[in-house]
Amino acid sequence: MPTIYEAIRKDHDHHRTLLETLADTQGDSAKRSEAWDEFYYDVKSHAAAEEEAFYSKLMEKAHGQDDARHSVHEHQQIDDIMEELNEMDMSSPGWLTRFKTLKHEYEHHMEEEENDIFSKARDVLTDDTDGRIASEFLTRKDKERLLVDEKAAASLED
Ligand SMILES: [Fe+2]
Ligand SMILES: [Fe+2]
């Protein structure tokens, strides 16, 4: 069983690869639209599971609250850009400009989680050598993946 840190990092590596594929493909090619769908669903379920299985625990600790709030706020900003892109024509110049902002913001977010938040979390959370938090994260992520479309529709109605 991986630890929560390994499980999150594994997802991030997958997301980094998809961001490169999206940047390297053209127009509305099949390869780009497949990469976008995978990115959209995987990042959304990853972020929701992170909040439920990881940040909720960090939020309970006095020393973790600011970091947890900061990350959840970034999740919302990233989600807003993803929803915007999802409605746009992939072959338009506007899409690429907005995508570059998303790529920049999300790469920064992942880096911050890995380099900054993980080490603080290790100080305040019980360790995850038995993979308990990771297994909760993976279970939540599977559930969240099925809810992505429903949640997106509900947030558009707000
Ligand atoms: Fe995150
Ligand atoms: Fe993450």
Image (spheres, helix red, strand yellow):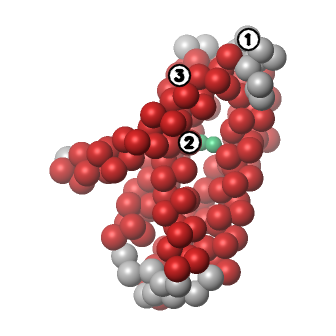
Q: Circle 3 sits on which residue?
A: 56
Q: Is residue 92 visible?
A: yes
Image coordinates of residue 66 in percent, x first then y, are 58, 29
Q: Amino acid at mark 2?
A: His
Horizontal side of residue 80 vs 30, given as left or right: left
Q: Which corner quadrant of the image does residue 104 belong to? A: bottom right
Q: Secondary structure at mark 1?
A: loop
Per the image, the residue denoted by label 1 is 126
* Mark closest to the chain's N terminus, 1 or 3: 3
Q: Residue at x 58, y 18 (%)?
A: 57
Q: Is residue 147 above or below residue 35?
A: above
Q: Which mark identifies residue 46? A: 2
Ligand 2 - quadrant of the structure image: top right
Residue lying at the far left of the rendered structure: 157
Q: Amino acid at mark 1?
A: Thr
Mark with earlier residue (3, 2): 2
Q: Is residue 137 above or below residue 41?
A: above
What secondary structure is marked by label 3? helix
Residue occupying the point 49% across, 63% down: 37
